[in-house]
Image: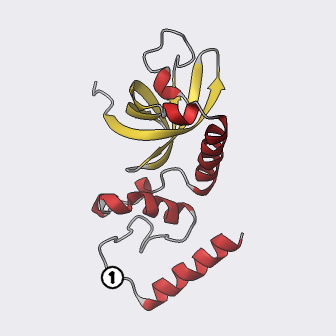
Amino acid sequence: MASTPHIVIQGLVLRETETKDADKILTLLTAERGKLSVIARGARRKNCKFAACAQSLAWSEWTLYQKGQWYYASEGATLELFNGLRSDLEAMALGFYLAELTEAVTTEENLESFGDQDQISEDAVMMMNWAVGQGILTGRTENQLAPQEAVTRAECAVMLMRCAEAVGQ
């Protein structure tokens, strides 16, 4: 039996939602994969090894595995809790507001359906996730984005129109 592959990723916890007796569903914002929903089993227990890094506005490193459409946390380490932010009520409220806004304008990872997603430069992954999630980019074919190919004027016009429609909503 093959083991489930794990990914190690850093991200900011935008939101934490309590579920079941001791679990949380976390919304993480990552540079590599955009917005991810992660189930952190036991994160509400006192002795949980990743309780601290499962807090909203915590910058953490996660070891995740995927099962179906969900990511599950197997390990987590806090990299930064932003104590200065947490000690100032006004700053913390602004941080939560910005996290909520960020969550509203970002989308879940959408590039997995494209066979050539590995050709996207690391710097562009988050923006490409957003553009695909908003329907601005749909790919050259059903499963090919062709991220290294030139864009025609017609394709550019269509993307601009879709972007204008997305902003106008």
Image quadrant for the N terminus?
A: top left
Residue at 66%, 75% in the rendered image: 165
Give the residue at mark 1.
150
User: Residue drawn at (70%, 73%), measured in percent from left and top?
Assistant: 168
Which residue sits at x=31%, y=33%?
5
Q: Residues within 10 Å of mark 1 (few under 14, many from 20)?
A: few
Residue 9 image offset from top left, x and y in percent: 36, 39
- Between 14 and 3, the residue placed more toward the observer is 14
Q: Is residue 11 left or right of residue 136?
A: left
Residue 56 shows in the view:
no
Q: Is residue 13 left or right of residue 112?
A: right
Q: Quadrant of the C terminus?
A: bottom right
**Image position, residue 136 (x, y; %):** 54, 71
**Amino acid type of disc 1?**
Ala
* Residue 82 appears in the figure: yes
Q: Quadrant of residue 18?
A: top right
Q: Position of residue 10 (x, y in %)?
A: 38, 39
Residue 140, horizontal then vertical, whole percent: 42, 75
Quarter of the rendering containing residue 2: top left
Residue 105 horizontal side relative to residue 29, left or right: right
Residue at the limit of the structure toward the right, as seen here: 169
Is residue 8 shown above or below 104?
Answer: above
Colour setup of the view: secondary structure
Up the image or down, 19 lies above or below 12; here it is above
Task: Please determine whether, in this image, residue 135 is positioned above or below residue 46.
Answer: below
Q: Nearer the viewer, residue 105 or 87?
A: 87
For residue 109, above or below residue 130: above
Furthest residue toward bottom: 153
Q: Residue at x 48, y 40 (%)?
A: 12
Badge 1 marks a residue whose secondary structure is loop
